[in-house]
Amino acid sequence: MGETTDKKIEAIKLFTDKNKSIPEIAEMLGVSDSAVYRWKREDLKLGKDWDELKRSANTGLAEVQKIYYELVKQKLLEIKEKPEDFFDSKKADALTKHISNLKKIFPKSLYINTIIDMIKETDLFLSKKNPEVRKVMAGYWDEIQTILLDKAEIYD
């Protein structure tokens, strides 16, 4: 690689990973500010957005957790709109795996609250689609919810 190419690669690393400004990068690499701005602009035309790379590189665990939680929440909202999907074994299995992942990355109270929301939605679904099963389950929902809330308080 040529010296310019090496410096451009280093400029990208400094910008995205080290959070350096264009003037700081230019000074560190011994090039003009305009050279670094030009590299950045050229890459953008080629579909390589330095700013997006920087955001991705600096995404912390809390942001990843939030994104994942929102994705699982969206799936739950989809089930709310079409509860019969929960009885599709593949979809139910996928949701169960996502909830398992939530257990690993979130405080217990967050995933327990998600499960409680699922219980409420399931109860509502059963009240409309299968009242007999709902009658059987109605006596258990409050007890299950209490147990889950107690566990959330113990472990958080």
Image: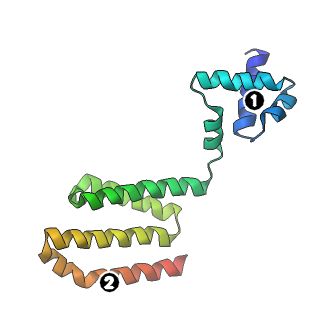
Residue 71 position in % (x across, y down): 43, 53
Label 2 sits on a secondary structure element that is helix
Q: Is residue 24 above or below residue 67?
A: above
Quadrant (top left, top right, bottom left, bottom right) of the C terminus: bottom right
Q: How is the image coloured?
A: rainbow
Residue 116 position in % (x across, y down): 37, 73
Label 1 sits on residue: 11
Q: CA distance from mark 2 to mark 1?
A: 58 Å
Locate residue 105 relative to residue 6 in the image: left or right: left
Residue at left 31%, top 56%?
Answer: 78
Residue at left 52%, top 81%?
Answer: 154
The numbered disc on residue 142 is 2
Kind of residue sitting beneath label 1 = Ala
Residue at left 62%, top 48%?
Answer: 59
Label 1 sits on a secondary structure element that is helix
Sequence-first disc among 2 and 1? 1
Q: Can residue 44 be seen in this snapshot?
A: yes
Locate residue 20 relative to residue 144 in the image: left or right: right
Q: Is residue 84 above or below residue 125?
A: above
Q: Is residue 17 above or below residue 8?
A: below
Q: Can residue 7 be seen in this snapshot?
A: no
Figure quadrant of residue 61: bottom right
Kind of residue sitting beneath label 2 = Asp
Figure quadrant of residue 88: bottom left
